[in-house]
Amino acid sequence: MNYTLDKSEVLFRGKVFDLKVDEITYDSGNKGIREVAIHSGGSVVVPVTNEGKIVLVKQYRYPFLKYMLEMPAGKLEKGEDPYLCAVRELEEETGYKAASVVKLGAIATTPGFCTEILHLYIATGLTPGNHNREEGEATMKVFEYSFDEVENLIAAGELYDAKSICAFHMAVSKLHQKNKTE
């Protein structure tokens, strides 16, 4: 660490994140400003059907003003266990319940300005059911793709959501490791 913190102030408290602005002084004497989005994090699920298909959702993303293809995911409630968030979001967005939900790892989404950590899971032994979407998810659609099709969607730039790409590749790695040990 090559700086000292002079002042820290939360300028905005929101539903999704808070915005903190820190004034710092580097060891050189130069001043700096750091704007930080304080985010509670979330969970991302790679649902794999019994037929070996990946379940993706297409939902409207307001910041981009368009629909995007993604893995099911959601924000952690304050103090919520990431595993329970993953289970909740899987059912809420897709209707599926899973016999097994295993953690793949975690990622820092944008460490240059945001504290968000996403916990990545793979869900197998899926049983279809009814989704329970929030109002903003009413137009969400569910799709199933083979692993090769997901790779092609990524290569074609049709699936470009970073959390989904990371989760997919971590799931592929986990499944390859599992197959090696069997």
Image: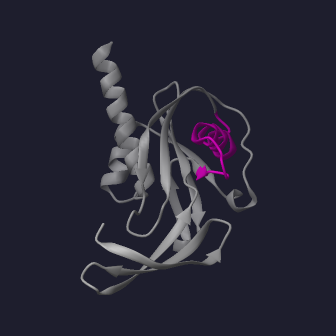
In magenta, the rendered stretch is 74-96
**Relative to the observer, which residue lies in front, 101 or 132?**
101
Q: Quadrant of residue 158?
A: bottom left
Residue 35 showing in the rendered view: yes
User: What residue do we see at 41% from left, 63% from top?
Assistant: 110
Q: Is residue 111 left or right of residue 62?
A: left
Q: Is residue 89 magenta?
A: yes
Residue furthest top as drawn: 182
Percent position (x, y) of residue 123? 53, 32
Q: Position of residue 166 (x, y in %)?
A: 38, 48
Quadrant into which the N terminus falls = bottom left
- The C terminus appears in which quarter of the rendering? top left
Whether 66 is drawn above or below 91: the answer is: below
Residue 133 horizontal/vertical position (percent): 72, 51
Q: Left or right: 16 with respect to 37?
A: right
- Picture coordinates of residue 106 (x, y %)? 43, 45
Q: Is residue 10 above or below residue 16?
A: below
Image: 110 above or below 99: below
In this figure, which colouring scheme has been used for the structure? one colour
Q: Quadrant of residue 24?
A: bottom left
The residue depicted at 56 percent of the width and 74 percent of the height is 19
Count of numbered labels shown in the rendering: 0
Identified at 58% across, 42% down, the residue is 82
| Residue ranking furthest to the left | 28
User: Which residue is at 63% across, 65% downward?
Assistant: 16
Q: Is residue 57 magenta?
A: no
Q: Is residue 149 visible?
A: no
Vertical order, 98 against 25 (above or below): above
